[in-house]
Amino acid sequence: MVIAVGETIIFERNFSKKDIELFSQISGDEGIHHLEPDEQGRLVVQGLLTATLPTKIGGDHNVLARHMNFEFLRPVYTGDTIRCEVTISHFEQQEKRARITAPFSCTNQHGKEVLKGSFSGVILRRD
């Protein structure tokens, strides 16, 4: 899989009540806002569950993350469609690995940014 500086990778998903329940069990993040619906019947998605969008893209490209930075800007609710755009800002092929850095932005279906940040790491060669 070829990765180049300037390439943008996009992933989109919705989070369900079941996703929140499972993540609550795994993470122990059982804040009341994750377990009891608001007046519109929605649950707030855990921030780190939202952060799985850029990590999924990294995983798709076999990135072994070394640094990850997240800035949570707005809540994400069940039923929201979140679009994550990752743009490769640095890619350096080395003898046994490649170094990669990429900022990302996640927006909801209304075009509002809900999460931004960056990650860097390595992709190990498998010969």
Image (cartoon, rainbow, N blue to C red):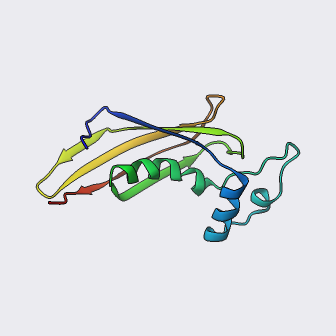
Q: Position of residue 51 (x, y in %)?
A: 54, 51
Residue occupying the point 24% across, 40% down: 2
Name the residue nearer the viewer: 54 or 90.
Answer: 54
Residue occupying the point 52% across, 53% down: 52
Rendered image quadrant of residue 1: top left
Q: For the C terminus, give its image quadrant.
A: bottom left
Q: Position of residue 24 (x, y in %)?
A: 67, 65
Residue 28 vertical placement versus 91 (above, below)? below
Q: Position of residue 36 (x, y in %)?
A: 83, 57
**Would residue 96 appear left or right of 77 to someone viewing this image?**
left
Residue occupying the point 62% across, 35% down: 108
Residue occupying the point 14% across, 52% down: 94
Rendered image quadrant of residue 81: top right
Residue 25 vertical placement versus 2 (above, below)? below
**Would residue 100 appear left or right of 18 to someone viewing this image?**
left
**Would residue 2 appear left or right of 31 to someone viewing this image?**
left
Name the residue nearer the viewer: 8 or 118.
Answer: 8
